[in-house]
Image: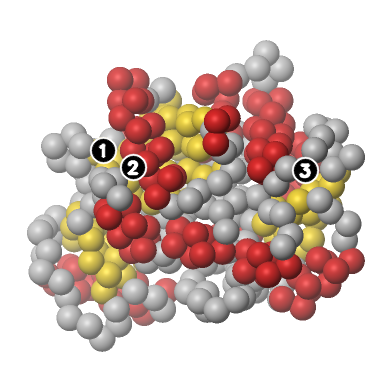
Amino acid sequence: MHRVLLITGPGGDAQGWGNMDVTREIAKAINGSGKYADIAFVSNKDELYRKLDTCKFDLVWSALYHVTENEATIGMADSGEDWVADILDKRRIPYIGPNAADMKALINKTATHNILDRSGVPVPYHYQVEQGHPLPKIVFPAFVKPSFESRSVGISDNSVVNTVDELAAQVGFIHENYDQPALAEEYLPGQEYTVLMLGNGAVQIFLPGMVTVNPKLFGRYPILKEDLRGVGATKIQPAGELSANLIEATAKAMKALNCLDHVRADMRLDSQGNVKIIEVNGIPGLKPVKSWSPQLYTLHHASKKGEMEDYRRLINHIVNSALARYGIAE
């Protein structure tokens, strides 16, 4: 029986698949697939080292980019070897997801945009604004968000800026409240889409969907604000005729970023109807039914037994893809 060690901590919801309730659901799904899951809740690196030294496992799956007691945000982790994937790489421990270097590129939105742009993948034009640096000369309307967060953290109607004064105010808000660079980029007014990548190599699959929200929940702009994420307000519908374009852009992005096992690309349409990737999530949310990964899996692979059976199959797919990648036999 294969054993999977699930690593989470205070930052599990902000950084990764969700809180302890979600982690228990993942463990339940793994156990229901004929494997065994153990949960390691860690608040500092010493606790992580102790779990790695004492637990028995064949594969690690972490909800954390880096270990922290901060429950609210990801923040700018030290670029040194303090990330979970750094530690696992150093110990040559098999784990789910991209390696440490690629994880660091994924959580840094500016780095992600630059890698994709060099690879010919369409992204918004963008400028990273460091604290104390001058504002960029940008076309309005523009969009301002934290450079190192996920789950729409730091995004509100004020994120859409139409003047230099509004740009300065929102950049200052990011600097003051999140202690990290702001990312000022092209505002994309069109429909939002998402594509889930599962597996690797010849068995890799892409599951596209259109992100829908009750228009009454929007404010001044049709954007996914922080209070709309992770609460079941967003629903995934078929992507329709754009599916092929979405999959093509995602496949190029995943190759450029060396993505593995379970990664999701989010994108919107610009004013001309062109698809542009706005974020690539290295640890997608896994709240049953509510998160986009489970919704996408059910959209494309619904079973007669219902959404929780779909969820178990999704989790099993992710785990099996990583086991196969490492050559760990069933």
Alpha-carbon span between mark 3 and mark 1: 38 Å
Q: Give the SS element for disc 2.
A: strand
Q: Nearer the viewer, residue 266 or 93?
A: 93
Q: Give the SS element for disc 1.
A: strand
Q: Going from the N terminus, do you reach mark 3 or mark 1 first?
A: 1
Q: In this view, does 131 lie to the left or right of 32?
A: left
Q: Position of residue 116 (x, y in %)?
A: 32, 52
Alpha-carbon span between mark 1 and mark 2: 7 Å
Q: Residue at x 48, y 51 (%)?
A: 258
Q: Give the SS element for disc 3.
A: loop
Amino acid on which disc 3 is placed: Ile
Amino acid on which disc 2 is placed: Met
Amino acid on which disc 1 is placed: Val
Alpha-carbon span between mark 3 and mark 2: 34 Å
Q: Residue 321 is drawn in which quadrant?
A: top right
Is residue 102 visible in the rendered image? The answer is yes
> Which of the numbered marks, if any, corresponds to residue 8?
none
Q: Mark 2 points at which residue?
A: 267
Q: Which residue is drawn at 69% across and 29% down?
A: 313
Q: Nearer the viewer, residue 274 or 163?
A: 274
Q: Name the residue under label 1.
A: 275
Q: Residue 148 is drawn in which quadrant?
A: bottom left
Q: Going from the N terminus, do you reach mark 3 or mark 2 first?
A: 2
Q: Which residue is drawn at 37% across and 41% down?
A: 252
Q: Residue at x 29, y 65 (%)?
A: 183
Q: Position of residue 57 (x, y in %)?
A: 84, 53
Q: Name the residue under label 3.
A: 328
Q: Is residue 292 above or below residue 299?
A: below
